[in-house]
Image: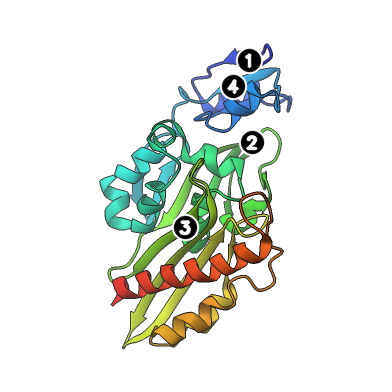
Amino acid sequence: MIAQDFNYSTPATIEEALGLISGGEAKLLAGGMSLIPLMKLRLAAPGHVVDLSRVAGLSGISEAGGAIRVGAMMTHYEVESSALVRARCTLLAETAAMIGDVQVRNRGTMGGAVAHADPSADYPAALQALEARVTIAGAAGTRVVSVDEFFVDTFTTGLEPGEIITGIEVPVEPEGTGVSYQKMLQPASGFAIVGVAVRIRKEGGVISFARVGVTGLGSRAYRAAGVEERLAGTAGSASDIANAAAVIADGIDANSDIHASAAYRAQMARVFGARAIQAAVNRAA
C-alpha cells in the first residue's frame, strides 16, 4: 500500500526539530524501520513527518566519565562496528550485531529503536543489563532518565510530547567483565521471541556482580532481579546457573501470540537465560 499524504521537514538543529514537533501531531523519522512500514500499511497516518537525519548533535560515539555515549541517530551497524563500543562495551556491540538483517542494521537507528519500545526488540534487554541512561531534549531543556524508567509498557515510553531522544549512555566495562546476549529469534523478522542479556564479574572465584535483562517475554524489557540475587556469591557452576535461571520468568505475565504460547516463552526464557549466564560466566573466568 501507499502512505497517505503528509508534510515532510528536515530540520538542521535540535531546536528547529523541537519547534516542528511542539504541536504534538508530528511523527519523528529516525531510521524509519518501524514508522515507514506502519505508514505504508496505514496503521499510522501522521500529517507531518520530521526527519532527524540532518540534525546536528545526534550522531557520534564518545567516551567520557566512565561512560560511552551513543548518539540517537547512530545506526545499528555503526554501533556494532564501532571500535570503541566493541572494546569498552562488548555487550552493546554484540547485541547490535544480532538485530534484524543487514538492511535493517544499515538503516535503523539506536534512538529510533529505543523510542519505538517494541517488547521483542533486542536493545532493551542489553540496556537493562547495562543500567543505561537515556538523554532527552525538550522545550524545558535536557533531562536524563534511567532505562528502567524509560521503558513503560508495550510501545510506551517515558518520552513526553514534544521531546526527542538525543543519546544513550552505557557504562564502560571493567576488565574481566563477562557478557553475553542470547536470543531465540523469530526467523522472518529477526525479533526476539525471547532474548536475555547478562553482565557478570567474578572476584575470588565467586560472582560479585550480576545484571540480567530480558526482552520478548513480557510487555516490556525488564531486569531479572531474582536471577541476579541467586547468582550473587556463587561460583557460577552449572547447578548455580540452573537455580538462578529457574526464576527468570517469575512474576511476569508472559506474552502469547502466533509465534509462542506464554508457557513456551517462559520456558525458553529459562533455557536462553541459562545459556547467556553460562557464556558470561565463561568469559568472566
Q: What residue would you read off at disc 4?
A: 50
Mark closest to the chain's N terminus, 2 or 4: 4
Q: What residue would you read off at disc 2?
A: 163
Q: 171 or 142: which is nearer to us?
A: 171
Q: What residue would you read off at disc 1?
A: 2
Q: Residues within 10 Å of mark 2 (few under 14, many from 20)?
A: many
In this rendering, position of residue 111 left or right of residue 258? left
Q: Position of residue 274 (x, y in %)?
A: 46, 73
CA gap, disc 3 to disc 2? 31 Å
Q: Secondary structure at mark 3?
A: strand
* Nearer to us: label 3 or label 2: 3
CA gap, disc 3 to disc 1? 34 Å
Q: What residue would you read off at disc 3?
A: 183
Mark closest to the chain's N terminus, 4 or 3: 4
Three-letter amino acid code at disc 2? Glu
Q: Position of residue 131 (x, y in %)?
A: 50, 61
Mark closest to the chain's N terminus, 1 or 2: 1
Residue 89 visible to an observer of this rendering: no
Mark closest to the chain's N terminus, 3 or 1: 1
- The answer to whether marks 4 and 3 mark residues whose Cβ atoms lie closer than 8 Å is no
Q: Secondary structure at mark 1?
A: loop
In this rendering, position of residue 192 left or right of residue 56? right
Res 270 quadrant in image:
bottom right
Three-letter amino acid code at disc 3? Lys
Three-letter amino acid code at disc 1? Ile
Res 141 quadrant in image:
top right
Q: Secondary structure at mark 4?
A: strand
Q: Position of residue 113 (x, y in %)?
A: 53, 41
Question: Which residue corresponds to the image point at 61% horizontal and 60% vertical from the top-left?
Answer: 217
Q: Quadrant of the N terminus?
A: top right
Question: Which residue corresponds to the image point at 29% horizontal and 43% vertical from the top-left?
Answer: 81
Mark closest to the chain's N terminus, 3 or 2: 2
